[in-house]
Amino acid sequence: MHAQWPFAETSGRTRVSTWPVSYTHLCIGVATIAAAIGAGGLGVFIFRGVAMASNPVILAGAIPAAVLAVAADLLLGLLERRLTPRQATRE
C-alpha cells in the first residue's frame, strides 16, 4: 500500500512530486500583487506604471518578478531532485 500525495504525478514506475515547482510561481505572484495593499515589493512598479500608463515602469516591475519566479522555480526543482532519495529497482 502506498500513500497518495495530493500533488504528485505518476510517471511510469517512478513517482514525481510536483509541489515545490507548481506553487512557486503562485507564491511570487501573490507577493508581487501584495503591493496593492501597501506591502511593497516589485508590484509597486507595476501598479505605478498602470496608474501612469507607462509601459517601461510596468516592465521594470514585471520583468524582475518573472525572472525571480523562474529562478526560484528552477532552484527549488534542483533542490528537490538533489534531496529526493533514489529508490533501488528490482529486476
Image (cartoon, helix red, strand yellow):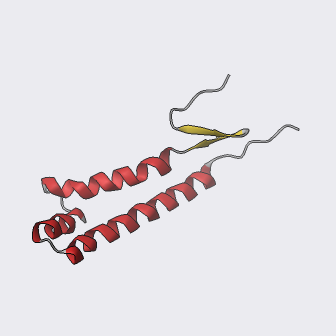
Residue ID at (63%, 47%): 84
Closer to us: 53 or 19: 53
Quick check: 37 above or below 44? above
Q: Residue furthest top?
A: 1
Q: Residue furthest bottom?
A: 56
Placement of the N terminus among the 4 image quadrants: top right
- Horizontally, residue 8 falls left or right of residue 2, namely left
Is residue 89 visible in the rendered image? The answer is yes
Q: Where on the picture, by quarter, is residue 50?
A: bottom left
Q: Residue furthest left?
A: 52
Closer to us: 57 or 6: 57
In the rendered picture of this protein, how many numbered marks are placed on residues? 0
How far across and down, in percent of the image, does residue 64 sit? Answer: 33, 70
- Horizontally, residue 18 falls left or right of residue 72, namely right
Q: Where on the picture, by quarter, is residue 57?
A: bottom left
How far across and down, in percent of the image, does residue 22 sit? Answer: 46, 48
Is residue 41 visible in the rendered image? The answer is no
Residue ID at (88%, 38%): 91
Residue ID at (36%, 50%): 26
How far across and down, in percent of the image, does residue 41 sit? Answer: 23, 63
Quick check: 74 above or below 10? below
